[in-house]
């Protein structure tokens, strides 16, 4: 297709569900299935790793500065990273992962 290749960091197509993710500057994961992609190496720690480019699975919801964050784990190299949830995220998916991740620790809470 004739679209010019331009590196716009946050725009990408989700390789898990095919959703076209339009970057809003806040998210690096798919708002539909919450999967991410292992592209950026974190400066410091493992900066020497080559870009692996594999899918990062949401494995748990963790607390980050008072808000929800997604713990992503790369299915290829196992690197984990934590990303804040965005307002566009599919809350059902967030709840599902949260429940899955916390299963066995607590019974489901009533609201
Ligand atoms: Zn997706
Ligand atoms: Zn990886």
Image (cartoon, rainbow, N blue to C red):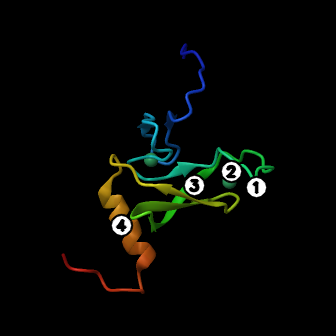
Question: In the figure, is residue 103 to the left or right of 108?
Answer: right
- Asked if the residue under mark 2 is in contact with the one under mark 1, i.e. CB atoms within 8 Å, the reply is yes
The mark nearer the N terminus, 4 or 2, is 2
Q: Position of residue 67 (x, y in %)?
A: 38, 62
The residue wearing badge 4 is: 96
Q: Position of residue 62 (x, y in %)?
A: 46, 68
Question: Badge 1 local density, few (<14 within 10 Å), some, or many (20+)?
Answer: few
Q: Position of residue 11 (x, y in %)?
A: 50, 33
* Residue at image coords 71%, 48%: 52
Question: In the figure, is residue 95 to the left or right of 55?
Answer: left
The mark nearer the N terminus, 4 or 3, is 3
Above/below status of 111 relative to 54: below
Distance between the Cα atoms at labels 1 and 2? 6 Å
Question: Is ligand 2 less than 8 Å from the beta carbon at label 3?
Answer: yes
Query: What kind of element bears circle 1?
Result: loop
The residue wearing badge 1 is: 46
Distance between the Cα atoms at labels 4 and 2? 28 Å
| Residue 99 picture quarter | bottom left
* Residue at image coords 45%, 42%: 26
The residue wearing badge 3 is: 56
Distance between the Cα atoms at labels 3 and 1? 16 Å
Query: What kind of element bears circle 2?
Result: loop
The mark nearer the N terminus, 3 or 2, is 2
Distance between the Cα atoms at labels 3 and 2? 15 Å
């Amino acid at each position: 297709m004739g679209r010019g290749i331009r590196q716009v960091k946050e725009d990408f197509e989700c390789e898990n569900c095919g959703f076209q993710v339009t970057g809003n500057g806040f998210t690096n994961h798919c708002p539909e299935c919450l999967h991410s992609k292992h592209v950026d190496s974190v400066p410091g720690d493992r900066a020497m790793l080559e870009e692996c480019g594999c899918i990062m699975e949401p494995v748990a919801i963790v607390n980050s500065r008072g808000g929800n964050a997604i713990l992503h784990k790369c299915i290829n190299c196992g690197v984990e990273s934590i990303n804040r949830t965005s307002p566009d995220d599919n809350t059902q998916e967030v709840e599902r992962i949260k429940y899955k991740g916390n299963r066995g620790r607590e019974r489901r809470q009533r609201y």
